[in-house]
Image: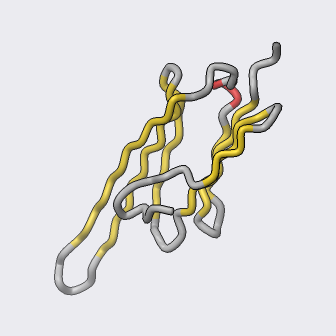
Amino acid sequence: MTNIATSITIAQINYQRSALRCENDCRDRDLCAAVRVAGDQLVVHGRHELRSGPSGMDIAREVHRSYKLPSDVNPKSLKSNLDKRGVLSISAAKKKM
């Protein structure tokens, strides 16, 4: 699993009969994440900011990843959630045949 400080990696992809499910571990990060569909791509954009105290140094890291969605996944059904544990979950239903 890759640390969000350098990238976002989909750690688990479960491609089931009726849905696509992904989980990303973003623990230990103050992460602001956006998930969207652009054409046939799943786009994940994350931003992490670390504010330092008296030294005056602020650190910001930003990452942008896109993944090709399988052709039988319904992009309009995409749902995402960043839970309190720091796990970013993404799911989408398959198209009805």
Tell me which residue sits at (63%, 69%) in the image: 85
* Residue nearest the viewer, comparing 11 with 48: 11
Q: Quadrant of the C terminus?
A: top right
Q: Does residue 61 appear to the left or right of 96 in the view shown?
A: left
Instruction: Say how the picture is coloured.
Output: secondary structure
Residue 26 image point, x, y percent? 52, 63
Q: Is residue 31 left or right of residue 53?
A: right
Q: Quadrant of residue 17?
A: top right
- Placement of 35 over or under 11, stated as above or below: above
At a point 30% along the width and 74% down the height, the residue shown is 51
Q: Quadrant of residue 80?
A: top right
In this view, the residue farthest toward the top is 97
Q: Position of residue 29 (x, y in %)?
A: 46, 69
Foreground of the two, 3 or 44: 3
Tally the marks. Answer: 0
Residue located 64% across and 46% down the image: 13
Q: Taking 13 as reference, is 46 left or right?
A: left
Q: Residue furthest bottom?
A: 54
Give whichever of 3, 88 is nearer the camera: 3
| Image spot of residue 89 (x, y percent) | 65, 51
Q: Residue at x 45, y 53 (%)?
A: 8
* Residue 57 percent location from the top left of the image: 19, 75
